Amino acid sequence: MQMHSILRRVFRRLGAEARLQGVALLTLTGALIAMLIVVVFVLNMQLTTKSILRRANVAVFLKDGVSQEEITQLQTSIESVSGVRHVKYLSSAQVREAFFSNEASKDGLEGLPPEAFSPLIEIEIEEDGRSFTVQQLAEKLKRFEIVEAVESHESWQSEVRAIASIINRLAIAALGLALVGIAFFISNVMKLTLSSRKDEIEILRLCGASDGFIQAPFLIEGASYGFLASWISVTITWFLKNLADREFDRVFDFIGVRLVFLDPWMIAAFIVIVTAICTVASAFSLRRYLHV
Amino acid sequence: MAMASDLANSGWEQASEEGTRRPFAYFRAGLTQNPYPKPILVFENVTKFHRPDHPTLRNVCLEVQKGEFVFITGPSGAGKSTFLQLIYQAQKVDDGRILFCGKNITRLNRDSLPYLRRNIGIVFQDFKVIPHWTVFENVAIALEILGLPTRIIRSRVGEALERVGLKGKGAQETRSLSGGEQQRVAIARAIVGEPVLILADEPTGNLDPQLALDIFTLFEEIHQTGATVLFATHDHSLIERRSYRVISIENGYAKEVRSHSMRESLHRSRKVLHAIADR
């Protein structure tokens, strides 16, 4: 079968069915933009969650009058635990300073002496690849005599993880539904196209055209819808992301997260998947409705 | 010139080696050296029912020789179209068999049908052209289906349009043409692949008498290049005009109301072919 003959028949239809094709392309692009926004949102949410969890520290409050030797010994022990990224000692004065660095904490408390604040050791823990839970670490640290109390954020972190997981699952379900919807939409567009070209198909059959010869332009058309709509939607979403960048930076700057877009591989995968779904949906429609 | 090469390919030759691998070979129009060739089309006790108690065709038996011009006539609804549709397998026979180029086509499966139809040029009363395509595109599609290269398609479509009197109109949209011209486009499409058999299903039914005569003359010219033509019509003025074989279908029975003069027909066709070759 000759490719140029197929393409010629595809292009012949461009003028004749411009309205239907335009509406189909616009609708598909709109749906894909919505999908991409969800994908970009989930991607950024995952990165933000990771970043927040990564920064979640364990604070070990020490008793008063602890010697520097004991502090160093404890610090060394904690550092030797795998999964601990960083250990930092803060004296009472440093804790006081850090406390009053926040404007809201100053009201009426400026008179507090450094002794009112317990010295502490801050532990930064790897979110991934650790061999213990934060709870287990906290329990072990409490056994040290020089430790007054241990403050972990395990319950808060668990909640963040649970919420992120729920949002992930909802997003995956929504994306799955959207893909099914796209397949259904393309299938219906093909049904309409087949109906409007019934006479043309009949004539081709009478001239001795094989099924492949008749179906090829429809498959190319379906694939083109997917390819064009996915490209356009990626471009538009990228512009939207750039527009949202400044606002996002203003709101989330304190956690050091920047808004990210899909990397080139993800974009390629998105285009391939959408094109494939549109082609398969067209093939399904042809199989079901091409009965001339 | 394409016509000269057609002469070289005359007879029942296959258009290409590829033909031997196809479910149904591709035959091209042209005269054989044998003045009494095997029949191109044979109906053997063919019966077709549209209603269980009332067969449209009953035990039809007939033979059509290669290079013949045959009128199929009968009143409206007699089964002329059904008769033709059974040949290009738009309908299936209920009983009996049809041999086309020696092959039983009633047993062809769906995948083989396109290969059968590439051997048959069909012209309809309602033209069946694609209105938003150009004249060239409407004719070229028959060759695109055969998978011919663009260069050959261009030259053969040009020749076909010239033969039907539409030279220079290839770029026009078909819907802008008159009824007679649209029918010429359909004829050009039917003959451009040089099929061995042309089926005309009341091609003059929608045309005024003068145009009908012009179109009929065109079919005669096509016939004279070696094609076998089955021309369904109920227009007796056309039938009376020529002494071709006439088969009448009435009450489901097909009877020959005028025999063919095969020798005369072949002699005339050969004279025309030689004249074209000499040119």
Image: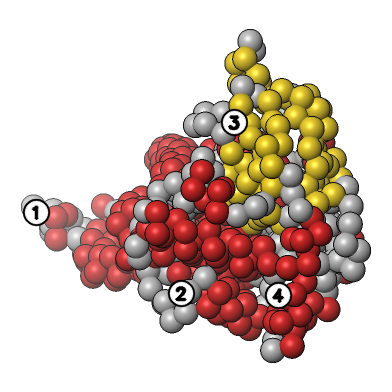
- Give the mark toward the camera: 3 or 4: 4
Across and down, in percent, residue B5 comes to 77, 81
Q: Where is residue B103 in the image (x, y as percent from the top left)?
A: 86, 45
Residue for point 58% across, 79% down = B159
Mark 4 burial class by Cα count in 10 Å: few <14, some 14-19, many 20+: some
The disc, 4 or 2, on the residue closer to the chain's N-terminal end is: 2
Label ID, residue A282: none
- Front of the two marks 1 and 2: 2
Disc assigned to residue B79: 3
Residue beneath the point at 78% across and 37% down:
B62
Q: Badge 4 sits on which subunit?
A: B
* Circles 3 and 4 on the same chain: yes
Q: Name the residue under label 2.
A: B166
Q: Which amino acid does label 3 sit on?
A: Gly
Tell me how far mark 4 sits from mark 2, CA to CA: 22 Å
In front of the other: A146 or B237 = B237
- The type of residue carrying mark 2 is Leu
Quadrant position of residue A162: top left
